[in-house]
Image (cartoon, coloured by chain):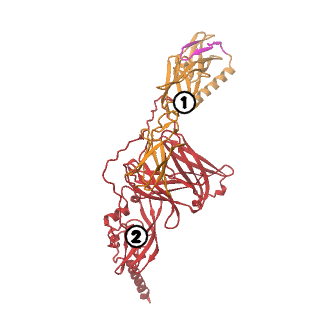
Amino acid sequence: MKLLLISAFAFVFLALVAVCGAQEIRVPATVSAGVETTISTSGSGEGTLYLLGPGVASKNQISLGQEVRLRADDLKHSGEYLVVVCSDSCRSAKFQVNSVQPARVVFLVHPSRVPVGQPDAVSGVAVPFDEYGNLVVAPLTVNFRASSAKETLLQRSARTQGGVSWFRAASGKAAGPVQVDASLDALTARRVVQQVASEPCNLRIKGQRTAKGIIVETEPVKDCSGNLVSDGTIVTFSATGPGERSTIDAPIKGGVAQARIIAPEPVVVSVASGVAMGNELHIGAKP
Amino acid sequence: MKFTLGIALALATAALIFAGMFRSPAAGGAVGIAAGTPILAPRGDSPERALSILLADLQRRNWPEAFSAISKTSDVDRASLIQEWMGTNGSLRAFSNLESFDLRPMHATADDAQIRAHLRWTTPVGPIEGLKDFHLVREGDVWRVVWPKIQLPSVPAQVVPVTYLRWDLVTGGSGDEWGSHNVDAPHVRIISMNAVNSASGAVVMGEVVNEDAIPAFVNVNATLLDGNNSTIDEESSFDRIAHVLLPKQVTPYRIDFPQIDPGRVKNVHMDVRATLVPASADPVIGVMNQKMDADAQGNHVLRGELLNQSGQVVNIPHVIASFYDGSGRVIWVSDGYVDQALLPLSSEPFSVEVPRTVADKIKSFHVVVNQYSLQRS
């Protein structure tokens, strides 16, 4: 709605400018956002100044031939501004408001969880903004750093292009939180990526027949990098006997999955989790 | 002449009232508790009639009448009968009603008879059918049902140590900085899909795996498209899937499209959605002694026993099974509810039906157990 009003306003003034002759206006070529500036006009007597820009549309009475102050509050948004001065005729001029020094870095990192040892698995995008929320499009150097408790996974500088800089990196070898920083001078934005164990590797079980049935248990379930697989991961135990089969989907707790199988006959117990298969146990019949 | 019609009507009314006094309760009668008691109780003068009266009394929860129709030789007391029929521990039976029944004599002599009852239950999860065989004996001039010994599950008092594992979900507030509290949705994947024709229409089935390190709430939707890529129908897996999947867990899913002519379907668009949910890794339920078998009617079924390996009651266990052919393709997905609660460290039998058309092609199967616990719902 606001944009529509500004557009209508601009249309009316451009029409006025088109049909009228006018005074001279001198405007600065560029202005920094949030900084007061002046424009000068020629002529004498009273006139009306219209200021149109991103997020502003104002009308003020001015004295022609004197310098006119444009308030800092009216120049907070970067972009192109249009000044129209009318008395018996209208004149217009344009100037550019540029963003100022970065005051904030918006930093997006994806994904929030990643299995270890994955190439190009983590990406981050840093976008600097000034104190007025303007995108800083001037090229800047952003330093990216990703580190875990054990290792530094990434240390890289990247120039912003059109106000954006980014990185892409492989995940590390150790499960756990990875701190990812984007620094721009004194500004730092921090995100955390959780590195989780990859697929189980070398799945092994042990078990024995007890009074309550066959108790089977995995050895600590680790991935191929030696990380304990996340608790809650399902391990499927299967006991195959003569004509029957029993299965239990047991979650890993404290690195180990355990199950109880009721089978009086001799059975072969096998184990699987995800794409990993483990060893087999041959358990004799109940005595 | 003018009195003849009146007398005829009066006689007919009296005859109908008299007949109503002795009328045996019909199978498929009203559901719920029947009000009042007949002036003259019907008598079980034949095996079918005796069982029919008993089932009608049980249907109406008319316990004194029902118990009187049970043979004294039965090793059952009234409280156990009520508990068995009404269900305990928040089981599915506790929320069910016998809607109707059919009786089929299996064997009869002058003094005893065997009758198979086909029982149809209404339940919160849809209609459930079951078979139960009854043995009846003649006691004097009436027939009575010999109720089998009731073994209600009971668990001795004990302490079950459990390593508690659950996931809670902490979400950021609206005032958080953009991108600072993002947690990705779990990664799940459809690992197989098969669309087949069944007697009732088109069926889409397969399996989904949670590839992530956190639990996921999963739902699978399928859209049937015709030759012009126009949508014919859209359905979700509803309850034929284990919605909460722990890491690396696989669940079958089945989506039915009743009344859809499979010949019109040229393409199927699948959509699996996963969201973060708080979840618990317990209870662990083992599926013991799984085997393909035939039920009393000769239907193919997958039988087994569910073994609750944890210390909490599972009120309504739900079994979902995927069946594979020789090449490892999912050719059918069946499911079934167990109407008895699964008590801690105890087991309950289950069976799920398999259509005759696929029974011969089945080379292996995979069973998962979904569960509903009143404490957590």
Which of the numbered marks, if any, corresponds to residue B285?
Answer: none
Chain coloured red here: B
Name the amino acid type tagged 2: Leu
Q: Can you identify the residue that label 2 sits on?
A: B55
- Work out whether B302 lies above or below B40: above
Say left or right for A155 vs B12. right
Find disc 1 in the rendering and name its residue: A171
Q: Is residue A102 left or right of residue B143?
A: right
Q: Which residues are magenta?
A: A22-38
Q: Nearer the viewer, residue B99 or B205?
A: B205
Chain letter, orange in picture: A
Q: Position of residue B139 (x, y in %)?
A: 34, 78
Q: Nearer the viewer, residue B83 or B123?
A: B83
Give residue B30's quadrant in the image.
bottom left
Kind of residue sitting beneath label 1 = Ser
Q: Residues within 10 Å of mark 1 (few under 14, many from 20)?
A: many
**Magenta region includes residue A287:** no
